[in-house]
Every structure is written in structure tokens, then in C-alpha cells.
Amino acid sequence: MGVRQSPDLLQQDMKIGQPHKVGIGTPQTGQPSHELEIESTTTEKPVVNIKNTNADANGAELRLTKKGGSPADNDSLGTISFYGQDSAGGVPLTQYVEVKGVSADVTDGVENGQVIFSVMKAGTLKEVARINPESTTANHFMGGFGYRRPFLEVTTATYTVGANQSGVILGINRAAGCTVTLPADTNVGFHCKVVVMTDITGGGSALKIATNADGDYFYGGITMVSRGAKADSFAADPSQHDTITANASSEGRHAGGFLEFTLLSTNKWLVSGVLVCTGTTPSDPFTTS
């Protein structure tokens, strides 16, 4: 298909290839490689303009639709990808950025969606942020003013922190105690906070925080503050300590304490914070499983 600009010049501006492929601005020697392909050799081109001139309050829409016979949780609904060359300058091109829409829950009446942001890091596409309102256990993301970290009240005997919950604040609100397991050491920079919201009382009741696997160890230290006006600090031994166990009043199982955990690299968790105990002599909460 072409547009005649003069008696002697035929300027091709659209090419229909096979099968069912359309190229706009595609060079005459090339064939479109996708269902719709727009190409330009001019700087800051091509520009796609979707215009609405109606006088109401509603604008245009760019819609990505996934419609099949078997919808399922976590289906990918559509992706916006950003590709470019690397230093080798060859083919295939490198995908540097990805924005993906996901149907987190397809249950009729209670549907939930997610948006996942991924970027290239050291040759691998990695997830860096996720908008996920599915539940208070899931990760949330808001940028700029109004940013808030997700808060989850934990009232169960055990809780395993998900790999996608970086930034979460866990409020331990169970007097009989709770065991919290940190995620696997695959997401460097992962960060979470654990807050003791109620006194953990009774024989055998404990606040326990453990790494996910053998070989994952704690770095850093914890300050212990006693309601009996006594304070002390304890350092983790990064060659053996993989658990924090507060199963006595002197080990910081009382309301008001908090701990923060950051994954520094494989097998290395940085811990810091303040735990509240009773009595006159705080005890070391670091243990080895």
C-alpha cells in the first residue's frame, strides 16, 4: 500500500506482510516481523497518538486483554516491554524493563490484580516492585508522597515471610508465642520488621525468628532493654547463629520490642533492633538451630 506524492515518486508508508502482519514505516527491503510494527529512522519517532475529542470527563483507553477458556490465578494478562541493544549491538535485542499485569485471584466477585515491575540487573531480569492489594499479607507499593509500608498482624503459632513481602511490618499479637521464618536468601536487599505487640507469657511460650535454611546466618546485634532499668547488647556470631529465641522474660519476649532484618547477600542476614525484657539481667537471645 502506498501514497503517491508526485507523478514520478511512490512513497511506501505501509506494508502488509504474510501471514497477517502490517508494517508502518517499515523499509521497503524489510518485512514486518510482528502483527503490527511501526518503524522510523527519525529522532524521537515514531509517536503513537490516541486522541479523544469528546467534551466529557473520560479519555482514551489502551486495552490489553487476555481471554481464554481456562482463567487461573496468576495468569499474565499483558506485558509492556522495553528492548534495546547491548554493547555487542546484535540480535536478539535485550529486554531491559518489563511491566506486567497479572490476575492474582480470578474468583468471581472477589477478583484481585497485580502489577509487577521488573528491570535488568547484571544480565538477569529481576522484579523490583509489585502493586498487590490482594491481602494484608501481600506486598504493596506506592511511590512519592503518601508512601506506606504494609502492616500485618500475626496471631498464628507460625508464620513464613513470603519472598514478595519486602517492606512488610509484622505485628506479633499472640500471647502463646509465634515462630517466624524468614524467606530464602535469593532476594538481596529484602527487608522486613517484626514488632512484639503483646507480652508473650507462660511456660514454653516464645518469640522465635529463624532463617530459612542451614547456612543462613545473622550479622549485627540486638539491644535488650529491661523494665527493671537494666540494659545490655548482644552480637550475633555470623559463623553459627541462625535463630533468635526469646522463650524467657529475660530474653525480650515482651510488648514494645522490634527487630529489623535485611538480606545482605547469600547466607547473610543483618539484624538490628531493641527487645524488651523483665528482671535485672537480660539474656542473649541468639541461638543455633
Image (cartoon, rainbow, N blue to C red):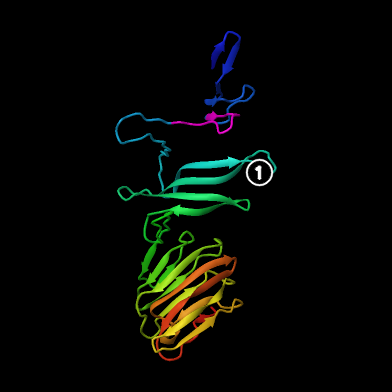
What residue appears at the point 53 percent right and 42 percent down from the top-left corner? Answer: 81
Residue at the spot of label 1 = 86
- Where residue 226 sits: x, y (%)? 42, 86
Q: Main secondary structure of the magenta part?
A: loop
Q: SS for tag 1?
A: loop
Task: Inspect the image, locate mark 1, and give the three-letter code of the amino acid beneath it.
Answer: Asp
Q: Position of residue 112 (x, y in %)?
A: 36, 50
Residue under the point 57% across and 10% down: 6
Q: Vertically, is 125 above or below 167?
A: above
Asked if residue 47 is among those painted magenta in the image, a careful observer would answer yes
- Report the front residue among 77 and 2: 2
In the rendered image of this protein, does residue 130 appear above or below residue 5?
below
Span of residues in magenta: 36-49
Residue farthest to the right? Answer: 88
Is 212 a magenta residue?
Answer: no
Label 1 CA crowd tier, 10 Å (few <14, some 14–19, many 20+): few
